[in-house]
Each structure stands twice: as structure tokens, then as C-alpha cells.
Amino acid sequence: MIYCTHCGSANSADANYCEKCGKPLRSEGTILPTQSSSPKITHQDDHTEQILWEGRPSDLGDQIRTGLLMNNIRYKITSQRLIITTGLMNKKTEEIELVRIKDISMEKTMMDRMMGVGTITVVSSDPTTPEVLLEDVKDVETVKDLLRDAVRVEKERYRTRYREDL
């Protein structure tokens, strides 16, 4: 399945346009996220970074801001990093290496459940941002599982072992 980067809806793998919003799913120079029900993450080359998922907050307020071209938060999960870009005029990008992620949790308030979104909390050993919130993520369970699997694969690649801080 291919997920639309504009509205987040799932589309068939061979679709060229989103079935919900009509926006193009493929454009030159843009790699769009693909997912299956159980994502398999593989590394073709140790230096190749693949985009696994891209999205932005998508509750009702965020959809209105997107329509007004004012939704300025973008999330990206690659095979090596979690990237959060914010800002309309001035851009700020925060990157967290997947091997530094310690814990991932998910929360869905009653309003989130009504809107079909949720919040993912990422706790890492990154010195600048030890805790990051990915708010109002559409299909939050799938994205959380995708991130979890990507972290496991990346830690396996670096042969990183889990250890409790006592």
C-alpha cells in the first residue's frame, strides 16, 4: 500500500493519485512511503538510507492549517533516522539516529480516537532532544510498529545490545 503524504489515506500500490484527496502519489524526485500490514525493513547496502514513512499532524485543526498552507510540521522515518522538520519561514530540523532510541509509546485520547489519530512518544539518548512527540499521527499503530521494527533492524545492524541503566 502507498500512503498519501497530503491526507494520509491508504491507496493501492499501483495507484498514481490518492483515492481520497486526488493529489498525485508519485512525483519526480520524491520517494513516497510504502507499507504492508507487517512491514519488512531491509538494508540493501550499509550506506543506503530508505524513506519508510512520511507524514504530518492530521487532526481536524491540522487539516485546516494544511489547507491554508500553514501546517509546518513534517515527520519522516528513514531506515537510519527519525527526522522532524518544523517552521514556516524559518526551518528547524531535528534528527534522531534510530540506534539512539530507547523507548516508543503511543497515546490515543478520546478525541484522538474520534479523529483517527494518536501521539507517539519517542525517548532517546539524544542529548538535544531526549523526548520527542509525534502528535496527531494518522494510523498511529502502524507507524509506531514501523518505527519499532526500523529501530530493531538498525540496532541489529550496529550490533547494539539492550542494557538497563541501574
Image (cartoon, helix red, strand yellow):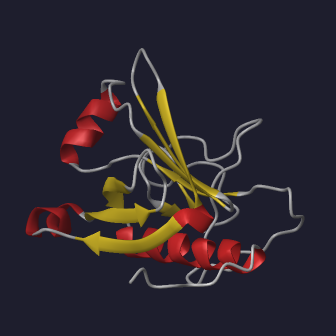
Residue for point 52% across, 76% down: 148
For residue 97, say whether it is visible: yes
Extreme-top residue of the structure: 89
The image shows residue 105 at horizontal and vertical percentages of 33, 74
The image shows residue 47 at horizontal and vertical percentages of 86, 56
Residue 56 to residue 103: above or below: above
Q: How many marks?
A: 0
Q: Is residue 11 left or right of residue 144?
A: right
Q: Nearer the viewer, residue 68 or 100?
A: 100
Q: Quadrant of residue 1?
A: bottom right
Q: Is residue 68 left or right of residue 30?
A: left
Q: Is residue 110 left or right of residue 33?
A: left
The image shows residue 137 at horizontal and vertical percentages of 35, 58
Q: Nearer the viewer, residue 23 or 50?
A: 50
Residue for point 36% across, 60% down: 138
For residue 11, say whether it is visible: no
Q: Nearer the viewer, residue 166 or 157?
A: 166
Residue 11 to residue 73: above or below: below
Q: Quadrant of residue 63?
A: top left
